[in-house]
Amino acid sequence: MSLAEGEIRGEITEQSLSRLLERKDVERTRPGAMQRDFLTPSRWAEGDLAKANFVVTSEMNERLARGIGDMNLLFLDPAYARKSPFGRKITPPSMMAYAENVNGAVDGFPGCHAIWRGLEFEWEEPIYTDEPILSSSRLIDAKIVDSKFAGGMAGIQSYETRIENLDGQSKGVYRTHWHRFSRKKAASSGKYKKTEEKHWTDEELNVIWEEYRQYNFNRRTSEALYVEDVDVGQDIPHIVKGPINLTSKLAFEFARGAGGWFVGHELAVELFEQYPNLAFRNEENVPEPPVAIHWTNERCQKYLGMPKAYEAGYERINWLAQMAMSWMGDHGRMVKMGLQFHGFHWQGDAIRMHGKVTAKDETTGMVDLDIRTVTHRGEDTCTGTMRVKLPVRQGSQ
């Protein structure tokens, strides 16, 4: 999309906001620049797949599970999943996030960077592997706010995506909220100059490796956790991730394979011709998608004024879901999750996911939790709430 009169590439302007708001409440079902050819039926698909705009194949599900480090057998083993309450393989609950057709990373404020402010999930039914899905996304609202980090102004955008199968059965609703800003102005703000450098000792790493063995590998699986066995005020078992490095980031980013923004050569030419305001110019003045900025320390320092490469947000929602599913086992269900993002996970950070039971209903099995991610520096990088549904013991009501 070309620039309109009054728009400035890479700047937050009222003209860009006005143009963006023209698309408010317009339902969009065609996957955008980031999502195209990612978790979508082949453009040569036939039958039911040709009617869908989103699908997670069994092969892709396994690759995504490896990318987030969550080898839950409900995602991977068809024989195991058939014996579970689901009856077949499911996708990770966070997979609804990938059904977005448009979001603040690709819509409006051309040439401006995007980071997450928050999100909400409402799950009704799991998305099964190889299940053709229809999703519809729309812009809910957009505005301009004051921002010290972004040189005075930032754009705020909110989106909603509704997901259903081809029979019209609702899978759930997903909402995201985005912060848009000028890379040039952010690079000169100096907001993150005091971020602590961390060099890990072998002794410190051994402590984290032991946490992996004690918590991450300790899943409830097929043993039911009943709502009667949960106490308000109880801390659920935490999990740990990291320390983040380039390899762990790319394992996640490229789990889906080539497509979307992750293309090269003639496919990159097509991408940037179709979306002329998407790319930034790299060190050789060659166009690349903006996601490539946050892969390396040097690029984050040069283009964003940030001290290091960072985890963009998608990983932590998977980690929090992993924590919950490991605790409640195969008989529990995710119902809701809302998160507010407060900070970045820099390269080299270790992150712990925590949850505390705040309420329960022994009639319905609903359990509410406060959840958060905490770095090794003790910073709460995101906080939020989660609701899960646990089984109720027969005869206890």
Image: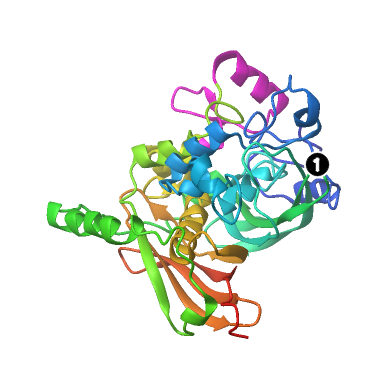
Q: Nearer the viewer, residue 227 or 291?
A: 227
Q: Which residue is mark 1?
A: 166
Where residue 339 sits, quadrant-wise, is bottom right
All told, the count of numbered labels is: 1
Q: Position of residue 313 (x, y in %)?
A: 51, 52
Is residue 127 rendered to the left or right of residue 340? right
Q: According to the image, what is the colour scheme of the structure?
A: rainbow
Which residue appears at 56% of the width and 35% of the height? 58
Instruction: Check the picture and name the quadrant holding the N terminus.
Output: top right
Report helix, strand or loop for mark 1: loop
Q: Residues within 10 Å of mark 1 (few under 14, many from 20)?
A: some
Q: Nearer the viewer, residue 261 or 130?
A: 130
Q: Residue 329, relative to residue 290: is it above or below?
A: below
Where residue 367 sits, quadrant-wise, is bottom right
Which residue appears at 65% of the width and 62% of the height? 120
Is residue 25 rendered to the left or right of residue 355? right
Question: Would you say residue 65 is visible in this rendering?
Answer: yes
Reply yes or no: does residue 289 show up in magenta.
yes
Q: Which residues are magenta?
A: 264-291
Reply yes or no: does residue 137 show up in magenta.
no
Q: Nearer the viewer, residue 350 or 126?
A: 126
Q: Position of residue 393 (x, y in %)?
A: 56, 77
Q: Residue 45, relative to residue 116: is it above or below?
A: above
> Type of residue at label 1?
Leu
Q: Residue 9, relative to residue 374: is it above or below?
A: above
Which residue appears at 46% of the width and 59% of the height? 222
Question: Would you say residue 351 is visible in this rendering?
Answer: no
Instruction: Check the picture and name the quadrant holding the C terminus.
Output: bottom right
Q: Position of residue 334 (x, y in %)?
A: 59, 63
Which residue appears at 13% of the width and 56% of the height? 203
